Image (cartoon, rainbow, N blue to C red):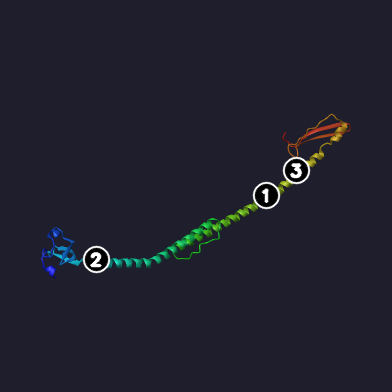
Amino acid sequence: QDLLTDSYRDCGIDNNILKGRKSGYFKLKLKNTDYICSHYFSDLLGFRFFTFIKNDTLLSKIHKVRNTMFFSTFGIIIIILPFLISLAFNITKPLSYLKNTINEFNNGNRNIRAEINTHDEIGELAYTFNVMADEIKNELALLENEKNVLELKVIERTEELFIMNQKIFDSIEYAKRIQKSILPDLELIKDITSDFFIIWKPRDVVGGDFYFFQEVSGVIIIAIVDCTGHG
């Protein structure tokens, strides 16, 4: 109270410090005690207000506030850190599990599914993956079944073609034997004459042409027959 009743000069305040400044603070020594002085000029009242606080008191309060902030921050970290670790663990572990599940599915294990039943975004991802995996497995099963059916049809058709081809080949061989049986015996021709030669080369197993030789009542009958009608 004594300080406030004195003038600026009596208090040791330099008017130059206040000149042109509406507010601010400065250091001041009064009665062998160091102070920090803050001031504010009110235009409405026309007064300048001063607040004095001892340096020791200010430093004590600063240290107190600093210690309070330090311990408060440390306490908050101690409280939040386990929560953050738990949160990170609960997020990264399911994501890692889901990633490994997808990789194993892509590597050929079509029966694997993501066993995540949480009601969050990761649970929705796992559910979507399981639905997709079921659809892919069903589609692959259908394709595999169609493939097996086609392979069975190919095998059956191949067997049918083999049987048919064998029958045709047997028929051709039989026709060849019939054709050879009707050709003249070379020994009979040799008994009549030795001055002859025969060139008979069918294009395939059975030829479309054949020759005929026979002696009838002293008359030699020779015939070359084209029975295909092509030439």
Local packing at callout 2 (Cα closer than 10 Å; few below 14, some 14-19, many 20+) is few
Local packing at callout 1 (Cα closer than 10 Å; few below 14, some 14-19, many 20+) is few
- The type of residue carrying mark 1 is Thr
Q: Residue at x 83, y 34 (%)?
A: 213
* Marks 2 and 1 in Cβ contact (< 8 Å): no
Which residue is tagged 3? 172
Pick whichever, 98 or 219, lies toward us. Answer: 98
Q: Earlier in the sequence, mark 3 or mark 1?
A: 1
Instruction: Give the secondary structure at mark 3.
Output: helix
Q: Earlier in the sequence, mark 2 or mark 3?
A: 2
- In the rendered image, is residue 173 in sight? yes
Q: Residue furthest top?
A: 195
Q: Position of residue 106 (x, y in %)?
A: 53, 56
Gap between marks 2 and 3 measured at Cα: 122 Å
Q: Residue furthest right?
A: 217
Name which quarter of the figure residue 186 lies in. top right
- Quick check: 76 left or right of 41? right
Q: Is residue 229 above or below residue 136?
A: above
Q: Position of residue 34 (x, y in %)?
A: 18, 65
Gap between marks 2 and 1 measured at Cα: 103 Å
Q: Position of residue 72 (x, y in %)?
A: 32, 67
Which residue is tagged 2? 59
